[in-house]
Image: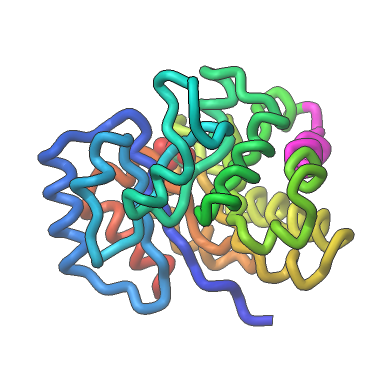
Amino acid sequence: MSKRRPLVAGNWKMNGSLALVDEMKSALEASEFANTDVLVCPPFPYLGSLASDGFILGAQNHSKFDAGAHTGETSAAMLKEFGCRYVIVGHSERREDNNESNLDVAEKVETAINAGLIPILCVGESEQTRDAGKENEFIAEQLDAVLKLIGIANVAKIVIAYEPIWAIGTGKTASPEQAQAVHEFIRSHLTKENADVAASVQILYGGSVKASNAATLFSQPDIDGGLIGGASLNAEEFLAICQAANA
Ligand code: PEP
């Protein structure tokens, strides 16, 4: 079957400035990626000023609650109102820094879908888990928590990002073969529930993607684009990665 439409998402994490907003906005507005969806996920304060026709907007997090007495939180509906189409859910940094459990992540996936956002569900193993040969088992558990809550039909409304923790921000990228093996596993795991949904869900790779390694990663049959951290803060580098997906 033909591959799914590529998607490249830039996760600025807690980085950025109004100067970067302007730089990225002009760079992306001047570019055209006919075959690829390009998504920018800045910190909350920059969402309003980044809204533009040249690319799609995503947030990095949202509350699992809909509204009410949750000081400091931001709801999925608010993000939708601010022009976000996507939201990153379950990034390993949030799982670690904020103790987000598989259940918390599943609840956020559900809340995002209910608000009309597309959650980008991040899954991925630590170095220790990979060394023990248990990466598939670990990822299956992360996926199953979400499947249990939202059901396989709703997986058609999400994007999955495989992000091995040992490759995030380390400069140590998974080889195209290592990444492809896990993407294939994720698809086969979902196939047990519904083959059509499994075949059509976009699965992104994230972990030290750069312009220099993007093309070989994206050429793998089950890799549909990337979730880009550090390299998304440099307009030239990010555009080159988007170009690799669009080729
Ligand atoms: C990320 O933040 O999701 C990420 C993959 O970061 P980096 O590209 O810097 O490894």
In the rendered image, residue 117, in percent from the top left (x then y), is placed at 50, 53
Relative side of 237 to 90, left or right:
left
In the displayed structure, 3 sits above or below 67; it is: below
Extreme-front residue of the structure: 68
Q: Which is nearer the eye, 51 or 20?
A: 51
Q: Report if residue 87 lies within the magenta region.
A: no
Residue shown at 65%/45% (left/top)?
Answer: 110
Q: Which is nearer the eye, 246 or 52?
A: 52
Residue shown at 37%/33% (left/top)?
Answer: 13
Segment colored magenta: 132-143
Ligand 1 quadrant? top left
Residue shown at 17%/59% (left/top)?
Answer: 27
Residue 210 visible, this angle: no
Relative side of 58 to 25, left or right:
right
Residue shown at 70%/57% (left/top)?
Answer: 155
In the rendered image, residue 232, in percent from the top left (x then y), is placed at 32, 46
In the rendered image, residue 246, in percent from the top left (x then y), is placed at 40, 72
Which picture quadrant has residue 60?
top left
In the displayed structure, 169 sits above or below 54; it is: above
Instruction: Report the coloring of the rendering.
Output: rainbow
In the displayed structure, 101 sits above or below 39; it is: above
Q: Report if residue 140 lies within the magenta region.
A: yes
Which picture quadrant has residue 64?
top right
Relative side of 17 to 214, left or right:
left
* Quarter of the image where the C terminus is located: bottom left
Residue 155 visible, this angle: yes
Query: Of helix, strand and loop, which mostly describes the magenta segment?
Result: helix
Extreme-bottom residue of the structure: 1
